[in-house]
Image: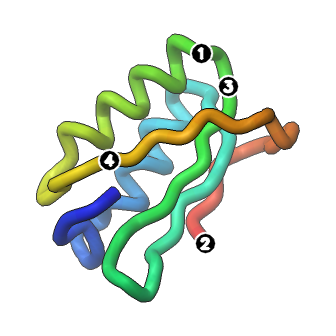
């Protein structure tokens, strides 16, 4: 996610939403000011979470890449 998304509890908001939706994965701040996240779960729940981050505060752009599941459990902030 690109934008001014660090320092506004964005990752914690994503974590709470992911836990409610039973989506596993993680979110972390990158040194370049972006936030990176991985979501695994039921496709409709993942799609809703992606929609949520698109509409997040101060989010300018979201890049989505489909990858093979890793078998993650829980959601963590890194």
Question: How many marks overall?
Answer: 4
SS at badge 4: loop
Mark 4 Cα-neighbour bin, 10 Å: few <14, some 14–19, many ≥20: some
Give the class, few, some or many, for how many residues have Cα within 10 Å of label 3's Cα (few <14, many ≥20). Answer: some
- Marks 1 and 2, how far apart at CA: 23 Å
Q: Is residue 42 left or right of residue 53?
A: right
Residue located beneath label 3 in the image? 41
Name the residue at the bottom extreme.
31
Q: Please tell me which residue is depicted at 59% across the width and 15% down the height of the picture.
A: 43
Mark 1 highlights which residue? 43
* Horizontal relation, residue 36 to residue 56: left or right: right
Name the residue rendered at 60%, 48% in the picture: 38
Q: Residue at x 39, y 47 (%)?
A: 63
Determine which residue is flagged by label 2.
78
Q: Which residue is mark 4?
A: 62
Image quarter for residue 52? top left
Earlier residue among tags 1 and 2: 1
């Amino acid at each position: 996610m690109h934008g001014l998304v660090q320092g506004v509890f964005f990752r914690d908001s994503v974590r709470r939403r992911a836990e409610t939706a039973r989506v596993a994965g993680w979110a972390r701040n990158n040194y370049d000011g972006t936030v990176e996240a991985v979501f695994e779960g039921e496709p409709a729940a993942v799609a809703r979470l992606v929609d949520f981050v698109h509409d997040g505060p101060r989010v300018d752009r979201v890049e989505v890449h489909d990858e093979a599941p890793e078998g993650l459990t829980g959601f963590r902030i890194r």
